[in-house]
Image (cartoon, rainbow, N blue to C red):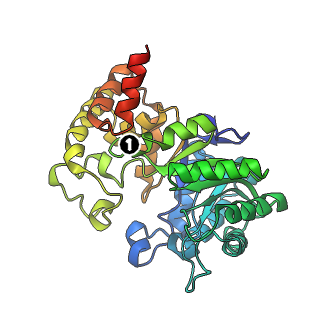
Amino acid sequence: MRMRKLGNSGLFVSELSFGAMTFGGTDGLWGQVGRLGQEDADLLVKAAFDAGINLFDTANVYANGRSEEILGRSLRNLGIPRDDIVVATKVASAMGEGPNRRGASRGHILAEARASLGRLGLDHIDLYQIHAFDPATPIEETLEALDVLVRAGDVRYVGLSNWAAWQIMKAIGIARARNLAPITSLQAYYTLVGRDLEREIAPLLVSEGVGLMVWSPLAGGYLTGKYAKGNAGDGARQTELDFPPIDRTRGEPLIEVLNTVAARHGRSAAQVAIAWLLRQPVVSTVIIGAKRLDQLRNNVQAVDVHLDDDDMARLDAVSRLPIEYPGWLLNASDKAGR
């Protein structure tokens, strides 16, 4: 397991990280995502740590706080040294009734940071991320609240999740102008079957030195190939929760190429899909989650898949985004200037 710097910070994270979204669900949405209790969680966290993973990601909203509680207890149960791991969590989603129990306001951020620290059983959060853009709160207020947490020692680094390119750049500019804690990372959706991030966000992250943490690298399980050509998936996540949205018309030819490349390497389609992400220069770490130990072990083996240029070209050709404005004009201008 290789280590990579997270953006321009001095923080090193494993190229694969562990997502605890499957912990603690009972019913409703979180029951569909995962219903893992403490014993199963301990097994997965131990396997991840033993494989070299040092970054563990969760969110206050996952299973209404139970994911944080279970993850924190797993780390204590296993006796994992605090300095050997990076714990990340997120804030912004509704954590109760009322307009002030949600969003990225100063009050909500500060209150939820304390609540997350209590659930995790930690004295600080390594990476605290704003889970979604809050149009009701000025970005200045959000960044100043995060800066308060960093200066108090409750948070070490701050990040964003699921923000548009213009929102990210505005936040970066405000943080620099006001000498606030810098934006270290973005957590975003990026897969072979969902490459939208490449239009505006990826170039921005590279330009400004912001690390990328990829969520749902297998597109909710679609890139395992088990949902191809109408396969139901035997009660797996894509059957219960159709998220993230997938263009299956474009996805079917991709699955065929993915399976071909996987067969050539004697690997699974999932491993190849993750290995493709690890070859992307913008990616700092890929978050993998699992409901079973065999799933986790299979996905971890993606770090040993070495795709050559021909593999990358075949996968790129079948998954490449159509060129949209101003992309086609920029390409034309670039060619004319050569």
Q: Quadrant of the C terminus?
A: top left
Depth order, front residue of 280/70: 280
Q: Residue at x 56, y 54 (%)?
A: 167
- The answer to whether residue 69 is left or right of residue 257 is right
Q: Quadrant of residue 195?
A: top left
Q: Residue furthest bottom?
A: 97
- Residue 190 position, x and y percent, is 43, 46
Amino acid beneath label 1: Arg
**Residue 10 occupies which quadrant of the picture?**
top right
Percent across and percent down for residue 208 are: 62, 38
Q: Residue at x 55, y 48 (%)?
A: 17
Instruction: Name the image quarter holding residue 326.
Output: top left
- What percent of the width, then of the height, locates residue 270? 36, 43
Q: Who is closer to the viewer here, 120 or 301?
A: 120
Q: Locate the N terminus by quadrant.
A: top right
- Label count reads 1
Q: On the picture, is 10 further left or further right than 311?
A: right
Residue beneath disc 1: 195
Q: Secondary structure at mark 1?
A: loop
Side of 167 relative to 258 (left or right): right
Residue drawn 41% across the image and 34% down it: 276
